Amino acid sequence: MDKIRLQGMRPLYGTVAVSGAKNAALPLIAATLLAPGTHILHNVPDLRDTRTMFKLLETLGAVWQRSGTTVQVDTTGLMSSEAPYDLVKTMRASVLVLGPLISRTGRARVSLPGGCAIGARPIDMHLRGFEQLGVQTVLEKGYVEARVESPLTGGSVYFDVPSVTGTENVLMASVQAKGETVIKNAAKEPEIGNLIDMLNGMGAHISGKDTDRLVVTGVESLHAVEATIIPDRIEAGTYLMAVGAAGGEITITNCCPEHLPALVEKLRLVGMDIEAREDSFIASCPVAADGSRCRLKAVNITTMPYPGFPTDLQAQFMALMIQAEGVSIIHETIFENRFMHVAELQRLGAQITIDGSSAVVKGISREQLCGAAVMATDLRASASLVIAGLSASGVTEISRVYHLERGYENLVPKLRAIGAEIEQVAA
Ligand code: UD1
C-alpha cells in the first residue's frame, strides 16, 4: 500500500488548478440513469469514487467512455436495478442511484451503506422522502428494496436536518412524479445547484435553486443532456490552507471563490491575504519587515450546512490551527465522530484536547511541530495530515493514502508543482 512522504517547512509558490468536484460529479453521474440516451459530462475528476460510480452504472447496464475530463454515458440499455454490497461498501454515495432508479424503473434494490469512520450516517431521511412520493421501501438482508405500485405522485418532503445526498436523491426521484413535490429544509450546497441545472437541462421543472425550499413540477419524460461539473470547493479550500501552513504565495485557478464564503472569511481573520477573483484565488501568508513569516492567529469555527463552514474542511482547518498563536475551538455539528485526525496530529506535537463535539487546539510554534509517521483515517482527515506535514519540521510519512485517492485528483503532483517536497512511495 502506498505512502506519502513529505518534507515540511517548504513555502509554496506558483499556480495550481482545481479539478471538478467529487460531490457534484457523483450525483450528476447518477442522474444520467434518469433518461435513456447518451449524456455528456464535462470536468469529471478521475478519482477512486467517480470510478466506483461508473462501475456501478456499468453493473446496471450503462456504457461509458472517458476522453480527458469529458465522459460520455449511454444509459439506454438498463438491465438491472440493483446496487450490490461490494460497491456500496466502498462508497456510501452509491445510494444516489436509488432516486434515479425509482424514477426510471419504478424499483431499486440498493445495499444499505454501513457506518463509516466519521459516524453512523443513516439514510432514513432519504427513505422517508421517497415514501412521501408513494414509494414503498423495506429493508431486507441488508438491502433497501424500493418499489412503486402505482405511478409516483408528488408530495411534501421535510428534512429534519438538511441532507445533501438526501436532497439530491429525493429531487431525482421526484422529477418525473405526477404533480408537484415540495422539499422543505432542503440542503443548499452548490453541488445541489449543479444537479438542479443538469436536471432542468434534461427537461425537469425545478425552482428554488440555492434556497431551502425546492419545488418540482413533475414532467412526463426527460432526455439526455450535456452538463459540466462545478469546481471542487473542498479541493480549493485545501490548497488555501496548504499555503497557510507552508507559507509562500499561490494562485488557485479553475475554482469558484463564491462557493467558499465561510472559509475565506475565517482565513482572513487568521491573517492570510486572500484575493478572490471570479474564478481564481491569490493567497499568501504575510511576512514581517525582516522577511520572516508572521504567525497565524487562532480562530474558532463551527461546522454548519452551506453556506456555513463545511465539515469537509474542518480537519484541514484544525491542521492549520495547530501552529497558530492562541487557542482555537473547533466545533463539529454535522458528524459525531469527525475527530479521528486529532490523535494523528498529536503525533506531530499538536496540542489538542477533545471536549464532546469540540476540539480545543492550543497553537504551538512551527519549530515545535515535528514530522512523524501518521495514518490517514478518512478522506478529509488525510488532507489535514498533508497540511500539518507541510508546516512541521522534518519528514512526515502518511500511510493508507487510498483515502486521499477517493477525493483528490493528483494531489501529490499538484503540490509538488508548487514547490512542496512530497512524493508517493510504495510501502
Ligand atoms: C454529503 C457529502 C459529504 C459531506 C456531507 C455534509 C456527498 C457525496 N457527500 O454527505 O462529503 O461531508 O454531505 O456536508 O455529497 N442524516 C440523517 N439521516 C439521513 C441523512 C443524513 O440523520 O437520512 C444526518 C447525517 O448523519 C449528518 C447530517 O444528516 O449528521 C448531514 O448529512 P448529509 O448532508 O446527509 O451528508 P451526506 O449527504 O451523506
Image: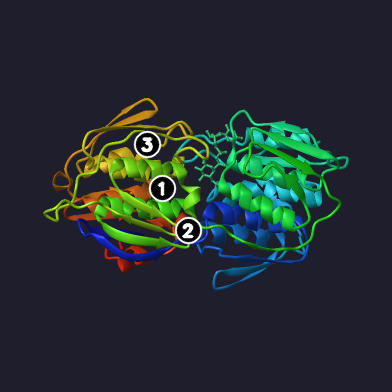
Q: Quadrant of residue 31?
A: bottom right
**Distance between mark 1 and mark 3 Cα atoms:** 11 Å
| Residue 123 visible to an observer of this rendering | yes
Quadrant location, the C terminus: bottom left
Pick whichever, 331 or 13, lies toward us. Answer: 13
Pick whichever, 140 or 136, lies toward us. Answer: 136
Quadrant location, the N terminus: bottom left
**Distance between mark 2 and mark 1 Cα atoms:** 19 Å
SS type, badge 3: loop
SS type, badge 2: loop
Q: Is mark 3 within 8 Å of ligand 1?
A: no
Residue type at numbered disc 3: Phe
- Residue displayed at 45% across by 39% down: 309
Q: Is mark 1 within 8 Å of ligand 1?
A: yes
Name the front one of labels 3 and 2: 2
**Residue tagged by mark 3?**
339
Q: Is residue 328 left or right of residue 219?
A: left
**Residue tagged by mark 2?**
255
Q: Quadrant of residue 270?
A: top left
Mark found first going from the N terminus, 3 or 2: 2
Q: Residue furthest right?
A: 150
State whether residue 397 is above or below residue 16. above
